[in-house]
Amino acid sequence: MVEEAGRVVADRLQKLEALREAGVEPYAYRYDVTHSTTAARSMFETAETGGQLDESGESGPVRLGGRLVSLRSHGKTLFADLADREGRIQLYFRSRDLGDRFALLDLFDIGDWVGVEGRVFRTRMGEVTVKVSDFELLAKSVRPLPFGKEEVDPETGERRVHHGFADIEQRYRQRYADLAVHPEVRRVFVLRARIVTTIRRFLDERGFIEVETPILQPLYGGASARPFTTHHNALDMPLYLRIADELYLKRLIVGGFERVYEIGKDFRNEGIDRTHNPEFTMLELYQAFADYGDMMDLVEQMLVTVVDALHGTRSISFQGHTIDFTPPYRRLPFLEALQVYGGLDATTMSDDDLAAKARSLGVEDVETMGRGKLLDELFGELVEEHLHDPVFITDYPRELSPLAKPKRGDPQLVERFELMIAGREIANAFSELNDPFDQRERFEAQVALRARGDEEAQQLDEDYLRALEYGMPPTGGVGIGIDRLTMLLTDQPSIRDVILFPTMRPE
């Protein structure tokens, strides 16, 4: 296989030299494109329907740019397929139209970028086609792309492609090749961009201001996770890649920005699996004078807006199951969910009882965990797989949520929710803790957990406490994982399928 690939590359390099000897520059500077493949097809079909084709049955002219994805030579004629960002269209080259330049096509290969000019017609087989009157090589492909074998049904004309790039690890590593040969993969990332654009528009229309907060931080916080650490030489101090945007965004609420949001990268030094990548994208938003009930309403409205924009329906398919996004979403307290789905009455169980149950389920490092972390692990093991349709899990244990306000009427709990869909967390939200004295006690409790060996416990942030001492109004906050939301709305099984360049081991 390697030897064969080497022979193909050597053959293409010979063609490249032959092109240069013929006076053809194989890497162009620019090309004036007037139509996409879709626009060229639409223009022809409109003219055809309106009886506006010329006496030869043609419309145009058009100038297209794209990649050759198939070549079919028939002596003095050649058919090819040109693909661009929107689709593909057939090309028709004739020796009598192109003269001596027709011979140059022998030096072209599948994967080459070309520009073509011509008029559009429909072949006897019914295929909308560009009859090429001029062409230009834009970039020679010296390494063959792993296009699959294509077969055309002789009766229906339907194309079937047997993919030649099936190794999923190589597809992630060589995303450029994956995108080039799989238009359905490109579509996922087009939809991802539309998700982000729709969210921005939704928040902007409601008076939120998009801001940017530091990625390199002297003290990390806002979540329970291990950071990536670096060193700043000029200042001779350690810095951390942020694990969350939360504490800086809430500083802005203190400063008088009443509605803020950020869509940006966070980094957590943790394992990699189907729903975790060390580098990921989060939306965090904060709204003054609101609580977690308001955030539930906001999240429902936002998701419905995004689903409508992407799919035009509120029922979508994810991994063979239908999910209905029509609000209102079910609201289920955390401890009640543990009892309903896990058979555990956490209100009567001691820390030792919880630890024993966690061990029996295969949870590791139980001895380093406080009560809140134990409950969180048990929830993950016993409850999450049962939560398919959108459900707000509410009112978490106080120990598990050091940045949330106590629940009104039950200070052992906090006003927090996680939106669970298809067994995974999509959003996390609080009635934000704005009492600086309570916040200090929570931080100190986290410091004690770190001393016991919990590396994910949060640190004590004196500057954030100082900000709270200046006064932060009642505030509701939400974090939404853009990657997981994209997985859900594009029906992708792994987070790597929605990140253009996921973190990989070295080759």
Image (cartoon, rainbow, N blue to C red):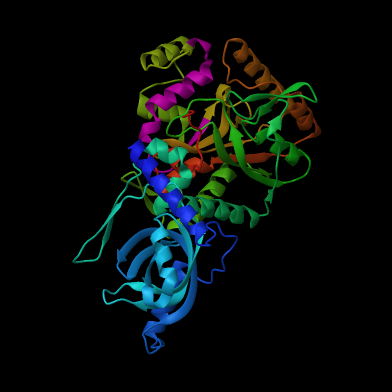
Residue drawn 45% across the image and 20% down it: 346
Seen in the image, is 238 located left or right of residue 17? right
At 65% across and 45% down in the image, what residue appears?
A: 261
- Identity of the residue drawn at 18% across and 66% down: 155
* Residue 481 part of the magenta-drawn span: no
Q: Nearer the viewer, residue 3 or 336?
A: 3
Residue span colored magenta: 367-395
- Residue 93 visible to an observer of this rendering: yes
| Residue 26 vertical placement versus 488 (above, below) | below
x, y percent for residue 428: 54, 36
- Residue at 44 percent across and 30 percent down: it is 273
> Residue 298: x, y in percent?
56, 48
Visible residue check, residue 329: no
Quadrant for the N terminus in the image = top left
Is residue 394 highlighted in magenta? yes
Nearer the observer, 338 or 451: 451
Q: Looking at this view, is 131 or 157 the one in front? A: 131
All told, the count of numbered labels is 0
Find residue 387 and report its image quarter: top left
The x, y position of residue 389, in whole percent, is 39, 43
